[in-house]
Amino acid sequence: VLNPHRRCVEVAAYQASVILSQLGRHKEALEHISKFKCTARISTEVWSCANSKHSYSAQCSKNKIKGSKSNASMVGVGIEQEPVRLYRNAIDERSGDFLRNVFRSGADYWEQNAYNDQGYFSWWYDLRETPNNVVETLIQSILPLTGMQGSLKGAE
């Protein structure tokens, strides 16, 4: 029980640090991220630009990001970021039941992916590709809800 609990705490701390950074609460984010052996983190200036309602070129290029060699590679271009958004009934009941079963504790997925041996990881899905599994199909089905179909290249 201790090992899965420890992994959940690590994932929760990571996610909390990302959300707090997205919200501009960088001191609180640092409290969570300091639990890892990180030697660097995304600067507050980058988060400010990423969360700006202005496009990259209008806002962030005027305010050079300290210590950055390539501002453009670090900041989304013209995309308004929101930390979290709830889309009610985005997943139909049948798909939700299937996903809960596939990812339940003790499901084959965890052993097949050696999840206990490598800790938290994520999958990247290129949105230009045809979906190959239920998660990618779900991503394609909920993408229109975000209104960002043309703005994104991929999803986790």
Image (cartoon, rainbow, N blue to C red):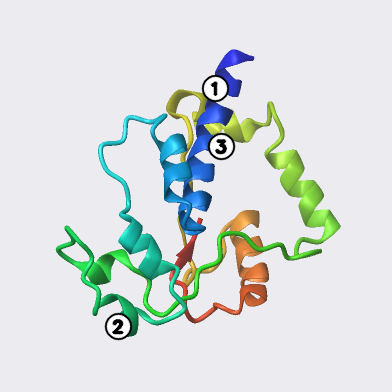
In what quadrant of the picture does the N terminus appear? top right
Residue bearing mark 1: 6
Q: Position of residue 93 (x, y in %)?
A: 85, 56
The amino acid type found where label 2 is placed reads: Ser
The amino acid type found where label 1 is placed reads: Arg
- Judged left or right of residue 9, residue 100 is right
Mark 3 crowd level (few <14, some 14–19, many ≥20, 10 Å Cα) = few
Instruction: Name the residue rendered at 25%, 37% in the picture.
Output: 39
Q: CA distance from mark 2 to mark 1?
A: 42 Å
- Furthest toward the bottom, the residue is 58
Which badge, 2 or 1, comes first in the chain's sequence?
Answer: 1
Which quadrant of the figure has residue 107? top right
- Judged left or right of residue 134, residue 151 is left
As displayed, is residue 6 above or below residue 17? Answer: above
Instruction: Name the residue rendered at 67%, 74% in the picture.
Output: 145
Residue bearing mark 2: 57
Q: Nearer the viewer, mark 2 or mark 1?
A: 2
Q: Secondary structure at mark 1?
A: helix
Q: Which of 38 and 120 lies nearest the eye of the viewer?
A: 38
Q: CA distance from mark 3 to mark 1?
A: 10 Å
Which badge, 2 or 3, comes first in the chain's sequence?
Answer: 3
Instruction: Name the residue rendered at 32%, 62% in the picture.
Output: 45
Q: Are marks 2 and 1 in contact (CB under 8 Å)?
A: no
Which badge, 3 or 1, comes first in the chain's sequence?
Answer: 1
Q: Which of 114 and 90 lies nearest the eye of the viewer?
A: 90
Which quadrant of the figure has residue 87? bottom right
The amino acid type found where label 3 is placed reads: Ala
Q: Secondary structure at mark 2?
A: helix
Task: Give the number of the disc on residue 116.
Answer: none
- Judged left or right of residue 147, residue 67 is left
Residue bearing mark 3: 12
Q: Position of residue 49 (x, y in %)?
A: 36, 69
